[in-house]
Every structure is written in structure tokens, then in C-alpha cells.
Amino acid sequence: MGTELKTLSGHTEPIQAIAITPDGQRIVSASSDSTLKVWDLALGTELKTLSGHQGSVFAVAMLPRDGEFQPKSGQQIVSASSDGTLKLWDLESETALKTLSGHAESIPAIAVTPDGQKVVSASDDGTIKIWDSDSGSELKTLSTNSRSVFAMAIAPDGHQLFVASSTEVRVWDLESYSELETLPWHSEVFDIVITPDGQWIVSALEDNTIKIRDLGSSPQQKTLSGHTDSVFDVAIAPDGKQVISRSWDMTVKIWDLDSMSELETFSGSGKLLHTIPIPPSGKELIWAYEWDKTVKIWDLQSNSEIGTLVGHTDRIRDIVVTPDGRLAISASADQTIKIWDLESKSELGTLAGHAGSVEAVAITSDLQTVISASADKTLKVWDLRSGLELQTLVGHTDSVTSVATIANREQIISASVDGTLKVWDLENREVIARFRVDDSALYTCAVAPDGVTIVAGEATGRLHFLRLEGVKDE
């Protein structure tokens, strides 16, 4: 819900949309680089890339079948692109099952009926098309009178389509395809959502407000005020009792629908670095704000903040959570690493020794060792249990910006502003492989689950995919 989610590096152009799988374990991102990427949400690692569109991918949505989302073996998504097509994908096979062609221009918005039988697309060509997701055939074309469509929503019963365009929302019947009514708004509508009971339509407006309109026989309209800039995104909690809004004022607000009152505001003194679900349940999130030096823990079931981890004296640069969900490890510009107990919400210890900002942190798969990367051009290896510094790895000639561990091996990789990626053997404290880019800094690196494929991202936006050959598992 923050202004920036956990940093998942891999796309080479801006990300336009995301969708989260129903089990909460994976994210699908759509990008202007013409691809979609599937990510492991807990680990923050890229699982696969879906390629096939010939232009920017502007929208993505999960595709249920018969009102149910299938298990991982059958999960499907639909994407829309500036190339004027939609594609239906199988997440496991990484293949496009169907390509839906018919629009003459870019497609900025899509919606899916609750049973997954119909996909609705809105195009800059001035039309809305309804498609049969099974056959891929076009069922109907509706006119938007050449107005740009900012958002669409489908009623929970699947019978009505709501289309936000300029200062109005038009309503169509999805059976007869007839226009039922036009709902006027006094300000530009950026987003709309329907409550699970179908009673209310909630809109995000340019005038800094959220409007809530009763869709029943005696329409009422209510206004939620509190943002100081345009509201561009709204969502409804699964129980239908709360509204979550995001605004260009850099805040997230949570509102109670019954009382129409503001429950909570989240801002932070700077950008939100990471939002990480805490395993194994994923029912809690951990947020790290860069500039206000805190880590916040958020309960998704109660929609409330349940803890704040305070201790760093300068901005937070990175944070990781152990796979068992017990510990968080944060890296800070105050030159320290802190270990936090997520159950007691308390600090367990501080690892000090770097002479510069700690830019990144990682933990080995056996949960015994912490690796830190610093602006002092070094990496340090720490014993997690005792907090003792085990070794210092020297070799980079500029700030070390990222570090990643290789599962089940005594090896790590590091990326640096000096333009090099290094693979280190921890037992022998030596570099066993290196890669250099010309005239650019490296800011991120990651290791695929196979332990062989390495990705490095540079300042220009380019990604380098490498294979670590000739290194055997321990």
C-alpha cells in the first residue's frame, strides 16, 4: 500500500501495473519493457519472465475459472498492451495461450468478470471490447465517445460494467450490452472500485477526495476528505468495511465505511523502501521507511500497525526477513546492521564495524551468517547468533551496493559502483569469478533458485544475465 513496494529489480522500463496471486505468494508485474515478470513475494526474487507483447504492457489481472482461482498448476492471467492486443497466459508454462486482437490502438485498462468468463478491455481507439476468455472471441464492442478511460470495475455479480472517463462513470449491462446510466462526478475520476456487496461505488478523484455513492434505489453520496493532493488509487478490504486510498501527497489512508471516518494515515518522512510479507503466514507486513529511520509491522487481518522498530540513527538502506519469519535484519546509513525479534518487536543486537553507510544485507540459507555491503568498499561476514564479525572481504574500489547469497553454497555475489560484480568464496575469502560493465555502476544483483543464474542491474537500466559455471555445490 506504500508509495514504493519492496524493490524487485529486473524490468528495464517503468512498471505500469501489478497483480497478486490469490494465495498472496506471487506478484505479476507489467512493464513498458514489453514483458511481464512473476516474482516470489516473500523472497523478492524473480521466478520467470513472460515475453510476447510488442509494446508496453499497461495492465494485468488474474483470471479466475468458474468463480474460483485455480491452484498454481492452473493459474492464468490476462495482460493488455500498447500493441493493441490482450494475451492470456498460463503462469506455469510461461506461454501465451491466446492473443486477443481487434483494438486499433493502445489498451490502458482491463477488467475480468468474477467467473472469469469475460474479459473487458478499454482502448485509446475509443472502444471497449468484451471478450470470451475460453474461445478468445470478441462478444461486443461499446463506444466510449472517444473519451479516455481511466479505470473500469465490474459489479460482484458480474452483471454490470462501470467505466470511469473524465468526470463521469458510465454503467453498462454485461448481458444485453445496453448502457444503463451515466453517473456524473464533479472532478476527474482516476480510479473506481465496487464494494463486495455491490452497494457502493468508491472513486478516487483529482480534487483530493474519495467519493462514495450508493448504487441502490435511493442514491446517496458521501465524501472522504483528508488528502492534500489528488487521489489516484482506491481499494476495498476483503470484508468490505474499509477503504484504502493512495494520493500524490505521498500518504496512504485507511477509512471506515460505516462511520465514514479516517482510521489511519501512513506517510513516513521519505520513500517507502520495502514492503515484505512476514512468512510463513504472510498475514503481516514489514515496512521500512528510508528517511524516518524506522521499521513498521502491519497486521493485514486487523488492518492495523502492530509494532514499530526504532533504533537506527540514520536512514535505512535495506532490510531482509528470515524465511521462518522470526527475525528482521536492517542495514542503515548509520554504519550498523540491526537484528530484530519480530515476535517481541525488540532489538536483539547491533553489528558495528563498517566505516561507511551499510547499503545492503543478506542472510545465508542456513540462517547462521549475515553478509553486509557498505559504502566503505567492503563486505563483512557476521555470525548471526553471537554478532561477531567473522571476516572482511576487500576488493571493490567503490561503494558496494548489493549482496546476495547462493543457496547451499559457501559463496556470495556482490555488486558495486565500480562497475564490477564479484563472486566470493567465503571459506577461502577470495574472488572466484568477476564481471565488469563499462562506464556504469552496478546497483543490484540477484541469484536465481538454480544457484547458477545471476542477474546484475546497472545504472543505465540494463540487466545482465550471467551463468556461474565450473563451481560445484558444497
Image: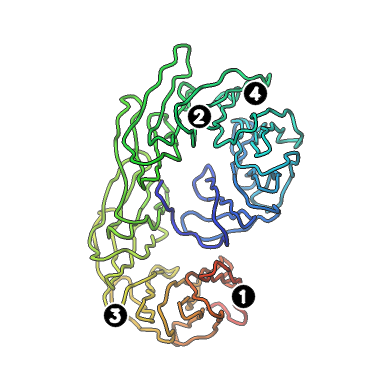
Q: Of callouts 3 and 4, which one flags the residue occurring earlier in the amino acid sequence? A: 4
Whether residues under marks 4 and 1 lie with C-beta atoms below 8 angstroms apart, the answer is: no
Instruction: Report the Cα–Cα distance between label 3 and label 2.
Output: 55 Å
- Indicate the amino acid at tag 3: Ala
Instruction: Report the Cα–Cα distance between label 1 and label 3.
Output: 32 Å
Instruction: Report the Cα–Cα distance between label 2 and label 1.
Output: 52 Å
Q: Identify the disc placed on residue 174.
A: 4
Instruction: Report the Cα–Cα distance between label 4 and label 1.
Output: 50 Å
Q: Of callouts 2 and 4, which one flags the residue occurring earlier in the amino acid sequence? A: 2
Residue hosting label 3: 355
Q: Of callouts 3 and 2, which one flags the residue occurring earlier in the amino acid sequence? A: 2
Instruction: Report the Cα–Cα distance between label 3 and label 4.
Output: 63 Å
Residue 188 position (above or below residue 445): above
Image quadrant assignment for residue 128 = top right
Pinpoint residue 409: horizontal percent, then vertical percent: 50, 75
- Indicate the amino acid at tag 1: Arg
Q: Identify the disc placed on residue 167.
A: 2
Image quadrant assignment for residue 382 = bottom left
Q: Residues within 10 Å of mark 2 (few under 14, many from 20)?
A: some
Q: Of callouts 1 and 3, which one flags the residue occurring earlier in the amino acid sequence? A: 3
- Residue at x 39%, y 58% (from the top left corner): 273
Q: Is residue 210 left or right of residue 18?
A: left
Q: Say which element carries label 3.
A: loop
Pinpoint residue 104: horizontal percent, then vertical percent: 73, 41
Please state which of the two labelled residues, at mark 1 or mark 3, is closer to the viewer. Answer: 3
